[in-house]
Image (cartoon, coloured by chain):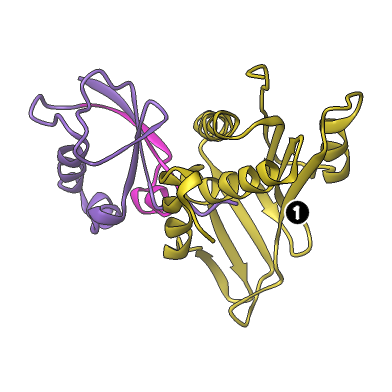
Amino acid sequence: MTVTLRYFAWVRERVGKTDETLALPPEVDSVERLIAWLSGRGEEYAYAFENPAVIRAAIDRKHVPAQTSIAGAREIAFFPPMTGG
Amino acid sequence: MSAVTPTVRVQRDPFDLAAEARALSQGRTDVGAVVTFTGICRGEEDGTPVVALTLEHYPGMVEEEITRHAQEAIGRWPLLGVTVVHRFGRIVPGEDIMMVAVAASHRQAAFAAAEFLMDFLKTRAPFWKQVEGNSGRDWVEAKQIDDAAAERWRYPYEEREE
């Protein structure tokens, strides 16, 4: 499955890019498995995702919990807790 | 009654709070209350001077998320109009960051819906603030008190006792 990943705020700074399109292996089928898989891709990812509990995720622009399946996702975003308002 | 469509704008430029509020009641006689909230950039945070805030956002998602919550407010309270404007980019102390304006026939619905929208904007709208101080930049950390404020709306509001 090929998916576009987007990163925001300090997740973006740590990963060192705003977005990328990656082909995911079939066993990477949930948001939490994707985080674990990304963490193994290099130091910058390991740093960005060192504390998965604080990472928020959205699939196709909707907030989702970490256990959510990513089947059919086109765009998955990772970011810290939001601080607007 | 269900014909209320929220106005949601995410923009770099400043906004005119008075004009936005006036637009909610202009040309109609059913509006009896307009409540507005304005978020303003402070010049100091916990005793540390703030040079500027920079707001990052997730284009597309942020408009959808705010609209979703505005529609939820319209479903919960008898509202006659909702306007949310939120800025992004670099904002200096004293400048407005965002505004919410809610119109209703009576004040209770307008106050409650404005507070509901603010609590959800804080925790669910994909914006991130970075503080520029005299010695560098830091991302603002989310506050637990904001999560708690949003959480209380998950109960039917009729059951809340103040």
Which residues make up the magenta segment? Answer: A6-23
- Residue at 37%, 50% in the rendered image: A11
The percent coordinates of residue B75 (x first, y second) are 55, 28
Residue A56 lies, with reference to residue B137, above or below; the image says: above
The chain holding disc 1 is: B
- Three-letter residue code for mark 1: Asp
* Chain A shade in the render: purple
The percent coordinates of residue A25 (x first, y second) are 12, 27
Q: In terms of image quadrants, where is residue B1? A: top right
Residue toward you, B157 or B69: B157
Residue B105 lies, with reference to residue B127, above or below; the image says: above
Give the chain ID for the yellow colour.
Answer: B
- Residue at 90%, 29% in the rendered image: B26
Residue toward you, B132 or B82: B82
In the displayed structure, does residue B47 sit left or right of residue B104? Answer: left
The percent coordinates of residue B9 (x first, y second) are 68, 33
- Residue at 79%, 42% in the rendered image: B34
Q: Residue furthest bottom?
A: B47
In the displayed structure, does residue B28 sit left or right of residue B139? Answer: right
Q: Disc 1 designates what residue?
A: B96
Q: Is residue A15 magenta?
A: yes
In the displayed structure, does residue B113 sit left or right of residue A42? Answer: right
Q: Residue furthest right?
A: B27
- Secondary structure state at the residue bearing disc 1: strand
The percent coordinates of residue A56 (x first, y second) are 34, 46
Q: In terms of image quadrants, where is residue B81? A: top right
- Residue at 50%, 63% in the rendered image: B140
